[in-house]
Image (cartoon, grey):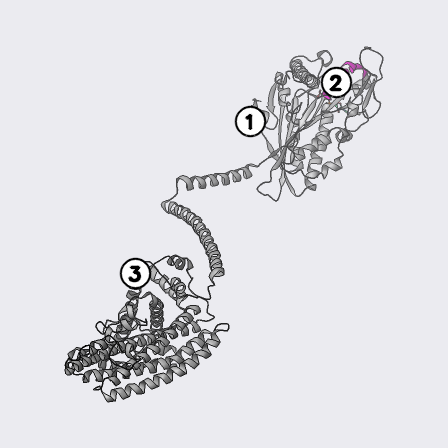
Amino acid sequence: MAASRPPSTPMSKIERAPTLTPGGSSKSKEEKIFVTVRVRPLSKKELAMKDQVVWECADSQTILYKGPPQDRAAPTSYTFDKVFGQSCQTGLVYEDGAKDVAMSALTGINATIFAYGQTSSGKTFTMRGVTESAVSDLYRHIENTPEREFTIKISAMEIYNEDVKDLLKPGSGSLRLLDDPEKGPIVDKLDEQVAKDKEHLRHLISICEEQRQVGETALNDASSRSHQIIKLTVESRLREVSGCVKSFVASLNFVDLAGSERAAQTQAIGARLKEGSHINRSLLTLTKVIRKLSSEKRSGHIPYRDSKLTRILQLSLGGNARTAIICTMSPALTYVEQSRNTLFFATCAKEVTNAAKVNMVISDKQLVKQLQMEVARLQAGQRTADHASPSEILIMEKDSKIKQMEIEMEELRKERDNARSQLEELRKKMGDKQGWNSFDSPQTARKCLTFSGSLQPSRMVKIRNSIRQSSTAPFMLKHEIRKLEQLQQQLEVEANRAIEVLHKEVECHKHGNQDAAETIAKLQAEIREMQSVRSQNRDAEMITDEGNGSDLKDEITRLHMQGSDIAKLEAKLENVQRSIDKLVMSLPNAGTQCNESSTKSNASKKKRRMLLPLGVSNLNRPNLARAPCSPDSSTRTLEPEVENRAPDCHTASHEGSGKATPAKSEDTGDISSRDEAPRNRGSGSVNMKKMQRMFQNAAEENVRNIRDYVTELKERVAKLQYQKQLLVCQVLELESNEGKPNDMEEDPQENAGCLQDGPESWERLFKEQMQHIIQLWDICYVSIIHRTQFYRLFRGDMADQIYIEVEVRRLLWLQQHLAEVGDASPAAPGDEHAVSRASR
Ligand SMILES: Nc1ncnc2c1ncn2[C@@H]1O[C@H](COP(=O)(O)OP(=O)(O)OP(=O)(O)O)[C@@H](O)[C@H]1O
């Protein structure tokens, strides 16, 4: 029943109702048509006829039949959303019966208010007041809502004799009805005007009323002969426009129907009769539609299309709109049947359910802008994909390659990190096992310094780096220092032994050179004295070494102290050799075999004197950068197999002299060998001269052998001196680099790989390094003398590897130094200018 209707929305809420968020409510809301009944007062004619008032409003929603009993089946009480008695003003009817629905248009909800009733029941009277109030309220709301911009448009039509006519455009003829898929039925070419303001709208509305077909009937002097529909389109949007803001748009229809009439009562004839016929027919269709819509079985056919009125009002009848129907009726008994029909219609109408929803649209301007942006985006994508210029294609390809390279670089970084971590683990393990800070065996040290590969530029850099790493390692230097110390001691012993043997040989050789013998004896005494001093020093050094290990600086200092000793030894050997040379020259068989070597030896001695031997006072970098002193004055080629090796007595003596080795006879002091003694004893008839000559020849041979042996010792001492110099260079380099970060990454992996290399690899590496050294000699203006000495002394023994590396290291430093002073251009071999520079 209508009694269960929710109360209408107060106007105050409508005026300041919060604006709905666009898109916040697109869901429809079902709502039944709001139906009210207004009973007008008795008209003058009804009063004149003393017609009886038979309808009375019992309350605001109930109307009762108070007249004489008629049809017992007819109800006497009707309830609606609102009933307005004879004294109610139109304002109240609007407020309570239409305003809520009308103001829905401000929030995007379609709204329709129409009046239904018999002719002269007061439909036009009511609708004019309702429309006027709604217009007033619309503009009042607009004025109170400055944040939104509103637009109100008006169009108006009448359905007169089933023709649709434009009330704002008189003479436009009958307009067609079209079905729009979205909007529903629309009137084609219906004029629509924008109301500039409230007055303008009122003016336009008044024009519509003036254009409406009105005719005089018996019941109404100004009877509306058509259905009038004034349509207001209300649009609103926020004034601060953003891209996503949409507008509300809704239609507010004011429908003033023509009244049903009975021809007998209206006494219509002619046109009026025809009009009445159309009116009644369309109203009958409306009634059918309402009845259908109000029935429980709504799924059946709704005859909207049976009349233009129902077609045009289709959305307002059971569709997307809120609808309010004001049914007007006369209270007179005379029209009780028509009033009952109205109440029956109203009763049906209040059962019709609509499904109204907020209508949001994007304005054309916004829509165009949005579409333009979308088109631009699509065009850009299309151009990129299909119509890129050559330069754009190139850039895209580059970008793709860069991305690919970045990916590959990332993979390489990961591989590098993995390799480093694995290497670090390997180092730790090896460090734990053998202790990288202390090499106990020369073999281990040598393996650590092993290189392999070809002498490509990159390989050269690796060699340099490895040299930097390996040759500057303190433990390696210490090891080499110790080795040199041993060699030095060994040479001292050998030299003393050789001198002793020589001395005995000379003493036993009666016709030997007495001066030489004295000289040898004197030297022998000096050497013994030197040995005694060396033994004391060595005892003290051993005490130091038994501690926590001596400092490298101390080591090299001690080696230098020994260096003075070995220099003395070298000088003594020089003297001994000179004496032996004199002795040999005094021998009867002294031939030309010795002349050549002696001549060259003397020349070498002169050269050697021109060069300063390395001493303590030379321990500074510039001096060290010079070519080291020439240690040798002999032309004898030093065989690799005897280098730095203690020769045994047999190998020290040349072939054919082993049987006459003086060492074998030193115990007895006899110059004759034991092998020779029986021979002497068993040959008493032998000519003594012949015997003496044989002894003399043997003695001479011994002397020559001793001379060769001494020469060999000299060579070894010279090499020892040279090695010491290189070690000093390296120690100084190490000290100068102390605390500095290593600017080159160590490549332990490379060294680890070299551990597997053998002598063949070393031979190849030696050749490469020598090529490198020769190149650096040219670059660094190294003297020809130094080159010759180095080339002769280091012939590829693996034990000399460290000195090869040190030479490279020294030359690299020299190259860098010369580059800094701006003179590092390669010199042609034999260039005197170059020689002088490298020797300065
Ligand atoms: N509530 C009312 N109070 C006072 N007078 C009214 C009321 N309703 C209608 N009238 C008067 O009744 C007469 C007929 O009213 P109206 O023209 O509005 O009827 P109608 O239903 O529109 O008729 P029709 O269908 O023929 O056009 C008018 O003169 C009008 O002034």
Q: Check if residue 785 falls in the magenta segment.
A: no
Quadrant in the picture for the C terminus: bottom left
Q: Which residues are magenta?
A: 332-351
Kind of element beneath mark 2: helix
Image x and y of residue 62, in percent: 82, 22
Q: Amino acid at mark 3?
A: Arg
The answer to which of marks 3 and 1 sits earlier in the sequence is 1
- Distance between the alpha carbons at the discs numbered 3 and 1: 104 Å
Q: Is residue 343 magenta?
A: yes
Residue 187's spot in the image, x, y percent?
Answer: 58, 25
CA–CA distance in space, label 2 to label 1: 34 Å
The residue carrying pointer 2 sits among few (fewer than 14), some (14 to 19) or many (20 or more) residues within 10 Å by Cα, namely: many
* Residue 764 disc label: 3
Residue at image mark 1: 189
Label 3, residues with CA under 10 Å away: few <14, some 14-19, many ≥20: some
**Which residue lies under the disc numbered 2?**
342
Contact (CB < 8 A) between labels 2 and 3?
no
Please determine whether, in this image, residue 145 is positioned above or below residue 192. below
Task: Decide which of tag 2 and tag 3 comes sooner along the chain.
Answer: 2
* Up/down of 839 relative to 353, above or below: below
